[in-house]
Amino acid sequence: MKKTVKWIRGILLVSLWVGCWGGYSLGTAPAVHAATVVVQDNFESESNLWDRSGDARRTDGVIELTQAQNNKLGYMWLNQSLSPPYTVSFKFRISDSSSSPADGLVFMFNKEKNSNGQGGGSLGFVEGNGYGVEFDTWPNEWDPGAKHITLFKNSPRHSPENLLAQADALNNPLLPNFANSAWHDVRIDVRTNSIKVSLDGVDQLTWIGTVDNSYNRLGFAASTGGSHSRHLIDNVTITTPDSNDATLSSLSMEGQTIQFQPATTSYQLSVPFEVDTARLHFTPDNAQASVQSVESTVSGAVYGVTPNSANVQLSIGPNPITITVKAEDSSTKTYTLNITRHGSNNAYLTELNALGNAILSPSFQSNQFIYEVYVPATEPIATVLFRLSDQNATYSVSGSVYGSGMASSLAAPIPGAPIFYPLNTEVNYYDLKVIAPDHITTLTYRLMIQRVPATQPNQIGYARMTEPNTLELAFPTKVVLPSPWNPSTVRLTGTDAKVTQMLSLDSRTDGTRIKLQLDHPLSPGENVQLSLLQGAVQLPDGEPVLQFFAPVLTLEQQRSLSAQLDAQQDGVHIDDVVRYMQGRPLSEKDFNRDGQFDRNDVLVLLQLILQQQNN
């Protein structure tokens, strides 16, 4: 008993998404692909797949198209429509023939369904459209003089216009005798651009050309005339080949434009620094195809993969990403996205400081681009420290470019180390140009470096500490503080202490005293200097009072001076001052340490006496 397998549709896809180096891919086991079975019928039972007419009937588990009688005609049409590509395989038997077998059978395809054709030599094929493969046993006037297999179009009456390919026993001695009452196996491959016929495993006919798809029905027919044979069909199987379509119908990246064409497999994209992830979406053109892998040259960059999407982390610079599509027949196609991620447009500094005895004004802010640097005239260089906000940026100093690993006598090899600026004139200009990693964005910080002469107008009478963290400034004239007042305009060098606020201001017509709060006490032994920058103090008419590197008398220094004055060790009095002043060189009378002896030095002495009395 033959096993009946009737109508089968579908295909089994098993998708295993697993991680691989630099990406994700399907399982590594090779897929075993077979053609998709559309129809399979061995006629052991009625399948309802076919429409029979004429003399065709199912009997004894086969289809009998004609009995072994004269003038018979039978049809069997598949109930469903079918267009290429597909493969039809079946068995046929021509037996119980008269003295000359007649007439043969024909497989019809890409044809309009009709069952009113002529018998005899036409084999039931209705002329006008469609294709036929005939297994002809009777030599009509349009046939060769022997059994033959013919592929024709539109008409079984062969002419140069409709005969596509033919094999006959006279010209092909290897052609089997297919009217010998034996079962013979036929395979017919119908593709969109070719037709191939094999008999008993041997290729007999091949035609190359565009197949006309105007009609899409297929079936069998057989006929007899003045002679006869019995024509049987069995084991019809129709399959569609697994598709080799490994193209994508869509490929996109969120936030970016890809001019996608399915036939184009390579694309170039540029994205800004802010885009650190490529969020890709893709759809195979064929429903039975799948994306086999998404890979990047960066290990671990691919994540969040689904059958239709993937995320890929982007490094700065080129990021080749491959998407490999696997077709139903296991053939593959690879699409490549070459995504270039630009570097950051960050050309800012995150730090800029003057080191040593130099003073930077104003205080650094990343979006402030013009600064003054004050340096004592005795200094041959100004030392400036800076740090790049983005360590992938490069920089140049006065036109010379310095990047990582490049040393210069003018600049340090890497950001974050000091730059030593040679000072040639009283005012020196230097441009620190920062080039962002995108090689497009630049910002320039200009430094105007001024050498402060050793002798300056005496703007401050004295600067001294009155408490461990309290600073007193005495001015010989009336001064005021601008509003609002910024403590950072008063700078101390030689210490890391900073002015935080004003405690008091005593302004008179003959002078002004200002007390300022420090963030912490000065340390013993520190040699502290004070500078008043633009905006620290001004005259009543608004003119700024500038002072650079004025010495600050620490508590330790004041105690030492008091000890020198108090020769009698009974406290400092006027007589001690007179005694000390007599016969001393001027250098020993410079109590405020501004390089000269004047009334301000006397004021310092008086303050020492007053301070002693208050204590």
Image: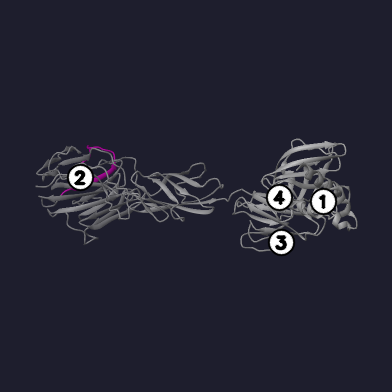
- Visible residue check, residue 227: no
Instruction: Check disc 4 and report the residue beneath it.
Output: 445
- Tag on residue 185? none
Instruction: Check disc 1 and report the residue beneath it.
Output: 592
* SS type, badge 4: strand
Q: Distance between the residues labelled 3 and 2?
A: 87 Å
Whether label 3 touches label 2, CB < 8 Å: no
Instruction: Check disc 2 and report the residue beneath it.
Output: 40
Q: Which of marks 1 and 2 is nearer the N terminus?
A: 2
Left or right of 300 on screen, residue 403: right
Pick the residue in front: 171 or 317: 317
Q: Nearer the viewer, mark 1 or mark 3?
A: 1
- Whether residue 573 appears in magenta in the rendering, the answer is no
The magenta stretch spans which residues? 102-119
Q: Nearer the viewer, mark 4 or mark 2?
A: 4
Label 3 neighbour load within 10 Å: few <14, some 14-19, many 20+: some
Q: Which of marks 3 and 2 is in front?
A: 3
Q: How far apart are marks 1 and 2 (CA)?
A: 114 Å
- Tag on residue 410? 3
Q: Earlier in the sequence, mark 4 or mark 3?
A: 3
Q: Which of marks 1 and 3 is nearer the N terminus?
A: 3
Pick the residue in front: 247 or 225: 247
Label 4 neighbour load within 10 Å: few <14, some 14-19, many 20+: many
Left or right of 57 on screen, residue 287: right
Whether label 4 touches label 1, CB < 8 Å: no
* SS type, badge 1: loop
Q: How far apart are marks 1 and 3 (CA)?
A: 38 Å
**Given the image, on which type of amino acid does mark 4 rest?**
Tyr
**Given the image, on which type of amino acid does mark 2 rest?**
Gln
Q: Earlier in the sequence, mark 4 or mark 2?
A: 2
- Visible residue check, residue 84: yes
